[in-house]
Image (tube, grey):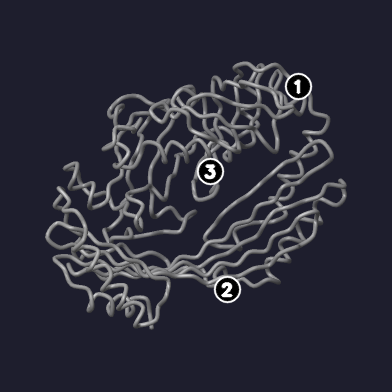
Amino acid sequence: MTLTEIAKKALNVASGDQVEVVVSKTEQALTRFANSYIHQNVKQTDGNVRIRVIRDGKVGVAVTNSFDEDAVANCAKKACELSDLAVKDTVDFKLPSKSEYRSIPKYDEDTAKLNPTDRANAVKKMIDVAKPDSLVVAGAVSNELHTFAVLNSNGVEYEMSGANAQMKVTAMSDDSSGQADMAMPRFADIDPVTLAKDACGRALMGRKPIEIKPDEYEVVLLPYAVAELVRYSAYTGIPAQSANEGRSWLQVNMGKQVYSDLITLIDDPFNPLLVQMPADFEGYPKQPLTIVENGIAKSLVFDSYYSAKMSKPNTGHATTGWGAFPMHLTMKPGTKTVDEMISNVKKGILVSRFWYTNIMNPMKVQFTTMTRDGLFLIEDGKITNGLKNMRVTDDVLRVFSGAISLGNKVRNTDGIVVPAMHCKGLIFSGNTK
């Protein structure tokens, strides 16, 4: 049976004022390597059926990971039972009605069908790049095919599939490391040799790192670091639920300048660098939505529930049980190359990426994190030394408000598309031991 056929069977069993069925299936495969050899190759197929029943203002949700007809029917009955037991919600919200959806290109079948040999060949190319410099590499090559269908009693009937591939590589010497990664809807668009050269280049530049005192420094952030800060900004303040609960930095600054006027952040479901989605997981049509325009806070993201609760238009950002969330964040590029950014720094630091990031104050997106896989001292417009990793404690609004220039190229890093960024200052609060 197709996912739509499974959803129809559930819809026929469940009863209520409104009924929604979302059926999803994911096929994932991964080849992992460390110490310059492959040590793991795995593949899994998983899926679930999520049924939401709304009647008399009460909502019941049940989920099963079995596509068996009896299991789906029992799940539908359970959702009905749970709706009877639920407390009546004060929000009278309506699920989406039947709509027209923008057409998108079919997913890349070669990416979906990638086999262990294909992934191993990519790994070999990365290992071969590292060998001449006696560097060891570790990382992973993965691909997936995700399909979901959403049907509801208001006439929505929609099914889509999307493929994606990702490659990550970390190159290591005795006292340094460098990492590069890329995700794309087409595996053929990721060049393992280019990635490996990128990672190895930073590992070689970072040898014999020195220590400098913690302070505020002018910085050039590579896309990996920028994406990390955008990601945590999204978690803390862009969903409507965070605004409704009084914890959204975006809501309290709506219409105000929150970033440099160089920065425009859009949630673009039709960005070709990402898996395109014409509809959200409620079947509501998606459109590009500007979150921040020229540094000014413009919009939260909504699903049907919070659209009704906060009397705002639905923006088509429903997920499966996690509220509204921006899944296609894209920052518009600027005009500078990374080398040009570096050349404009008298004294500062190049940051490759962050890890172990934690939020301390969501209203400012105040965070603490560590640098990793390439930290470099910039003096008189040139990289002069690798640096020992440092702790960073700052807030995203302050850092992004100080953007001096943006890179002229964007990169898909774990599903967020951003350029590099040159900023006036980033607070380095401690040294590593």
Which residue is pictured at 59% across the width and 17% down the height? Answer: 216
User: Where is residue 245 shown, x and y percent of the image?
Assistant: 29, 36
Name the residue carrying label 3: 410
Name the residue carrying label 1: 211
Identity, as a three-letter code, of the amino acid under mark 1: Glu
Nearer the observer, disc 3 or disc 2?
2
Q: 105 left or right of 223?
A: left
Please identify the quadrant where the N terminus is shown. bottom left
Q: How busy is the neighbourhood of tag 2: few (under 14 within 10 Å), some, or many (20 plus)?
A: some
Which residue is pictured at 71% across the width and 19% down the height? Answer: 379
User: Where is residue 18 shown, x and y percent of the image?
Assistant: 17, 65
Q: 396 left or right of 187?
A: left
Q: What secondary structure is marked by label 2? A: loop
Q: How busy is the neighbourhood of tag 1: few (under 14 within 10 Å), some, or many (20 plus)?
A: some
Residues 136 and 9: in front is: 9
**Residues at discs 1 and 2 in contact (Cβ within 8 Å):** no
Please identify the quadrant where the C terminus is shown. top right
Q: What secondary structure is marked by label 1? A: loop
Q: Is residue 98 above or below residue 309?
A: below
Q: Name the residue furthest left.
A: 56
